[in-house]
Amino acid sequence: MSVKKWVVGTPDREKAKLLAEECDIDPFAALVAVGRGIDDEGELELLMSDEPLLCDPLELADIKIAAEYINNAIALGTKIAVFGDYDCDGVVATSLLCDYLSSREADVIAYIPDRLDEGYGMNCAAIDKLASQGVGLIITVDNGISCAEEIAYAENLGIKTVVTDHHLPPEKLPEAVAVVDPHRLDCPSTFKEVCGAEVAFKLVCVLDDKEPEQMLPRYADILAVATIGDVMPLVNENRSIVKAGIKKIKTASNVGIAAILNMAGVDRTAIDAGKISFGIVPRINAAGRMGSAYRAYELLTSKNAMDALKIAGPIDDDNVRRQQIEKDILKSAVKMIEEGGYQHNRVIVVCGEGWHFGVLGIVASRICERYGKPTIVLSNENGVAHGSGRSFSGFHLYDAINACSDVLLKYGGHELAAGVSVSQDKVNLFRKRINEYATTQPVAVPQLNIDFRLNPAGLSVDMAFAIKSLEPFGLGNPTPIFGIFHVTLEKITAIGGGKHLKLLCRKNGNVFQSLLFGVTHEQFCFVVGDTLDLAVTLDTNLYQGQYNLSVQIKAIKMSNSDQDAYFEGKRQFDDFLSGFDTDYAAVFPSRAEVGSIYKMITASPISAERLKYIDTTIGYAKTQASVTTLCELGLVSLNNGILVGHTSNQKNDLMNSNTYKKLYERVNNGE
């Protein structure tokens, strides 16, 4: 995995102490809250309250017009189509609105476009199909704001449209009966960061002339799934919805959700935002990624538990198949990236043949995390490469793609995620252009935000329970991460059949255990005796009727490592390998410096990963240039991530290395 820059918070402990006293809460929870800018008694009470905090739906522009038109259509017996989307948010929004309209005995059908054949949003072929079925009104959910042409086409066929959406609108709104979207420039709503299902829910509240607090118990569970699935910030009313949804899932959830949890082997009484994110959402998404999302709609609108289980089983199978396809594509993509040297680019662009379009966004996220670089994954079919990109804070992916618009067929998105279509014969040009753009921007470095430092002497079960009072966690309110600094690694134990590690660490006489999941002993680059910094989360586990503290490691680094120097050295070496101008003198090692790295490796084989953390005295760029040179000369080899030195009785000419020769020429030519 890539190295992240640790950013450690220093909350005001005195302020947290006073706040804990004022609100009568655990001081540890108050310290976390203060570190996140919640330092007011009222704010903290709202954060921890179980009472729903929901905005007035009538704040949304056009929502009253939409409700009046739809109520009239119901009364007239007009056939209504709810036009949704194939992702979790879109499926939930479709299910929610259709369930409500059906309860009103409206003549309603659901239409969810096929991800591969139709793509996102309304399309004219679908409108023709709906027209042939006698539809007189289309209500869009989680789409429609950018479908002006399609809405006009529907109008010409005598079909009216009501738009409900939450995406950013174009300059000119579509000419629909009503356009309900909190991001309209003229929309007076106070909280904008809501998912498409929540906009549909607010429409239902107005349709039924009920306060949202009255309607929430009916839909809280599926609304929570949509909010988490669309990665909405868990603040304000989103937080209230997810809290209410978790409570409902634990007690009397939607039969479709209960069936999914059954298939996933998740105890619904222990459900939280994380289990929704990793247990429920991927399975709903899998229906649309691997086949028809309509099956997920049928699941969420099912009223019979046995029927729901019959639908959930194949969807669960699809999720397993999705995971395998994702792994296969990731493996192929990584091979292609490393053979092409794309991991050294500032933006990784990789294109495969016939890769399943439904998982490209997930693969892009995995690669972005692996290399710490914004990533775009494309799949070529019939001469056109379509794909998805992912980024992180500090590099605006949409702006970067927009700068290359003249070589693209189609694109869209925002800062952290985007979609792209480009002719296959222009993929290399696109890679070149987007990386040229990236060199004009500040270098983006992935960050790890740590709430504050912890002393291992104070670790306790009470701390973990105190944190739970701040749940649910997600975007906008992430799971607290704490830093435990300057600990000595004393023992490494493989657990879980060798798939995970248990580390025994010591600091000032205090010994504690921590768990590192998904890392084998062979992949672990630290050794007993190292002085380390740990980024950890705290949780509890129940064993033989007793709660125990579980310390889980999210990241590790060598203590006192100079992270700024590492990232600068990495940038210099990567830019050199990518063919961009850099400070070549800072990358070019002397013969003695190459010799020092050779001597270190021959003395004892070393993990290539470890070089990211240790101080070799010559800096990261020169260290990597030395290792590359030695590998090209055959004096060092890389086997399963381990660098091994080979002795030689001959004096080797460093100029026989292409890397060393290129650096020598550029330095001596004054570049």
Image (spheres, rainbow, N blue to C red):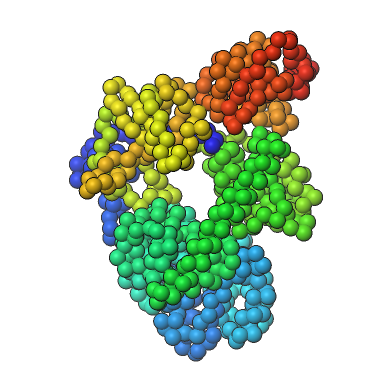
Give the residue at x 37% y 24%.
490
In this rendering, does residue 221 appear at all? yes
User: Which x, y percent locates residue 170?
Assistant: 61, 61
**Residue occupying the far bottom of the picture:** 76
Give the residue at x 44% y 49%.
475
Which image quadrant: the C terminus? top right
Q: How many marks?
A: 0
Identify whether 247 is placed above or below 441. Answer: below
Give the residue at x 31% y 34%.
12
User: Which x, y percent locates residue 27?
Assistant: 24, 39
Which image quadrant: the N terminus? top right
| Residue 572, quarter of picture | top right
User: Which x, y percent locates residue 350?
Assistant: 68, 45
Give the residue at x 74% y 13%.
652
User: Which x, y percent locates residue 643?
Assistant: 60, 24
| Residue 37, quarter of picture | top left
Between residue 136 and residue 445, name the one nearer to us.
445
Side of 519 relative to 626 (left or right):
left
Side of 467 relative to 396 (left or right):
left
Between residue 479 and residue 338, name the one nearer to us.
338
